[in-house]
Amino acid sequence: MQKSEETIFYTIESTIKTYRKYAQAQIKKIDSSLTLDQSLLILKLVDNPEISQKDLAKLLFKDVASVTRMIELLVKTGFILRKPNPKNRRRNILTLTAKSNSTMKKITKKIQRNRAVALHDISEKEIERCKKTLKMILENIEHQHSK
């Protein structure tokens, strides 16, 4: 049997963790109170201000309780305002603050730089082949899981 360190899954996990650690360090330079996951949550709100917490959780690969805790921290640190939704009492209206907007402008630039660093000397063809392979792995797992 192949050692776990020699599998593609080990390489994928190692790459993701290393990139996340690097990205978190870059975000800390901008705002030390903000985590990578919190900044991703804010960016999703920028793209879709009406998004539900359930949909946020799916996009962020988190459970709803984790997203709720993240939102609570973002409210406390002044990145998000939360108001009850008068049309649906089970949902809140999340609004980004001026602090959030100015911080995200800086973080967006940093994200572009992070990606450029990570993808340096990797061709578009190589990136597309990698994405295709990863999608195939995902489809294999989803197909097996649905049985």
Image (cartoon, rainbow, N blue to C red):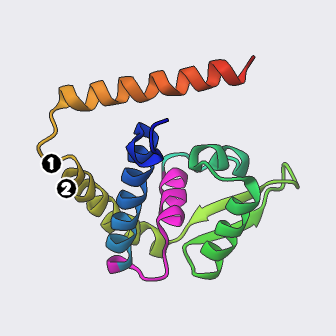
- The number of discs equals 2
In which quarter of the view is residue 147 placed? top right
In which quarter of the view is residue 89 placed? bottom right
Q: Name the amino acid, label 1.
A: His
Q: 10 Å neighbourhood of mark 1: few (<14), some, or many (≥20)? A: few
Residue 40 in magenta? Answer: yes
Relative height, residue 126 to residue 58 (above, below): above
| The one of 64 and 132 positioned closer to us in this rendering | 132
Q: Magenta span: helix, strand or loop, mainly?
A: helix
Q: In the rendering, at what x and y percent does residue 83 appear?
A: 74, 66
Q: Which mark is residue 135?
A: none
Left/right placement of residue 101 relative to residue 48 reads: left
Relative height, residue 93 to residue 106 (above, below): above
Q: What residue does disc 2 label?
A: 117
Q: In the rendering, at what x and y percent does residue 57 appear?
A: 66, 49
Q: Name the amino acid, label 2.
A: Val
Q: 10 Å neighbourhood of mark 2: few (<14), some, or many (≥20)? A: few
In which quarter of the view is residue 132 placed? top left
Q: Residue at x 66, y 20 (%)?
A: 144
Residue 78 visible to an observer of this rendering: yes
Whether pointer 2 and pointer 1 mark residues with C-beta atoms closer than 8 Å, the reply is yes
Residue 144 in magenta? Answer: no
- The residue tagged with tag 1: helix, strand or loop? loop
- The residue tagged with tag 2: helix, strand or loop? helix
Q: In the rendering, at what x and y percent does residue 141 appear?
A: 60, 26
Q: Which mark is residue 120?
A: 1
- Magenta-highlighted residues: 29-46
Q: Residue furthest front?
A: 1
Q: Residue at x 76, y 60 (%)?
A: 65
Give the alpha-carbon distance from disc 2 to disc 1, as whole Å: 5 Å
Q: In the rendering, at what x and y percent does residue 101 appear?
A: 43, 66
